[in-house]
């Protein structure tokens, strides 16, 4: 049964007495997905979220343009696929070649962090260039591997979890919620992940208003998450008044009222250099330089845990990734 078929939306509605549910628990027949949280691979974010994302949740990831939303979400999807979970990355912004290029470069950097890895900087640059040329069709796979052993290592590493990760090239004209369901469900399983990059581009037929479309889109994704017991990460764009602010908040996202109401977890990304209170950086150039290399992840909503928790992760955008081992922010932030 399709989640988005309006004719059938009431057919699965059932009421359950609590006494009946308690009896099912006692007998071991209570129906649940039976899955642990899905770790993002980012610490201490997973600790704050009590292990990661839960099936049935919609997780909002918001930031201004260029702050690494796609980089972060793709890295999460990669980490979850590597852990054995199924993930679909539906992208309205980039094609499959672009996503695969980023994934391979990210994997290359991860491989080179292993204790026995030792490659000169020039070899790393050569490997990134070979991956780019491979995705552009300038060279073939054999040439890429022969020219760079690092590329071969990255390919082997991705191959270990490639069957768990799916890319879906989405279109704001054609890729309706029904189409996302049709394309993702044969791959996804309960406990899996759907990434929507990004939410405001999801077309909802018959809903011309941007605000109403965002409301319907997040409502539909919530129903999708619950019905299929998957986690949905919905990347969200900033509204016009959110562009250029020192610290992006939930209220600065396009369609923020609907997003704040429907999402289970809201994570806002901000450059540390602008989001940190000026008194911490104004007279300390070393601390300011360090802040430029870091992004703050603020958990502004969390239905099952703490809120207003601020974490920082170092950027490695040359390799399309964040350093997954972060820390709690100790400085005051703008607006606090």
Image: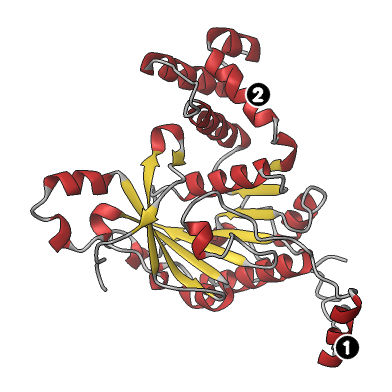
Residue occupying the point 51% across, 29% down: 105
Mark 2–mark 1 distance (CA, rounded to whole Å): 50 Å
Q: Which residue is mark 2?
A: 156
Q: Could you tell which of marks 2 and 1 lies nearer the N-terminus?
A: 1
Residue 59: x and y, percent?
57, 64
Q: Quadrant of the N terminus?
A: bottom right
Callout 2: few (<14), some (14-19), or many (20+) C-alpha neighbours within 10 Å?
some
* Disc sitting over residue 144 in the figure: none
Where is residue 330? Give x, y as percent.
Answer: 28, 61
Q: Quadrant of residue 276?
A: bottom left
Q: Is residue 70 above or below residue 123?
A: below
Left or right for 113, reference 310:
right
Q: Indicate the colouring scheme.
A: secondary structure
Q: Give residue 239's quadrant in the image.
A: bottom left
Tell me if I can see residue 220 in this picture: yes
Q: Give the residue pinned by disc 1.
A: 20
Q: Residue at x 69, y 64 (%)?
A: 55
In front of the other: 239 or 205: 239
């Amino acid at each position: 049964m399709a989640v988005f078929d309006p004719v059938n939306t009431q057919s699965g509605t059932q009421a359950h007495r609590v006494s009946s549910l308690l009896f099912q628990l006692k007998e071991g027949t209570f129906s649940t997905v039976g899955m642990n949280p899905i770790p993002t691979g980012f610490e201490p974010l997973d600790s704050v979220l009590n292990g990661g994302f839960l099936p049935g949740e919609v997780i909002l990831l918001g930031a201004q343009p260029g702050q690494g939303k796609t980089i972060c979400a793709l890295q999460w999807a990669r980490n979850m696929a590597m852990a054995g979970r199924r993930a679909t990355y539906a992208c309205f912004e980039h094609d499959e070649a672009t996503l695969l290029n980023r994934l391979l470069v990210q994997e290359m950097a991860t491989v080179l962090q292993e204790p026995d890895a030792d490659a000169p900087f020039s070899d790393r640059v050569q490997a990134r260039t070979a991956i780019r040329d491979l995705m552009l069709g300038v060279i073939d796979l054999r040439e890429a591997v022969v020219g760079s052993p690092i590329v071969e290592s990255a390919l082997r590493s991705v191959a270990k979890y490639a069957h768990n990760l799916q890319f879906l090239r989405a279109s704001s004209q054609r890729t309706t919620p029904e189409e996302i369901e049709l394309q993702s469900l044969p791959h996804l399983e309960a406990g899996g992940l759907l990434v929507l990059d990004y939410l405001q581009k999801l077309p909802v037929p018959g809903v011309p208003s941007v605000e109403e479309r965002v409301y319907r889109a997040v409502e539909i994704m919530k129903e999708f998450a619950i019905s299929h017991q998957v986690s949905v990460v919905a990347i969200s764009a900033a509204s016009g008044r959110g562009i250029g602010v020192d610290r992006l908040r939930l209220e600065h996202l396009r369609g923020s009222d609907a997003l704040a109401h429907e999402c289970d977890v809201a994570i806002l990304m901000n450059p540390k250099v602008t989001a940190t209170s000026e008194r911490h950086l104004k007279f300390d150039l070393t601390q300011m330089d360090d802040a430029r290399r870091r992004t703050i992840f603020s958990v502004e909503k969390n239905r099952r845990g703490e809120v207003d928790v601020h974490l920082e992760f170092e950027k490695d955008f040359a390799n399309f990734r964040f350093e997954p081992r972060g820390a709690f922010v100790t400085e005051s932030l703008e607006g606090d």
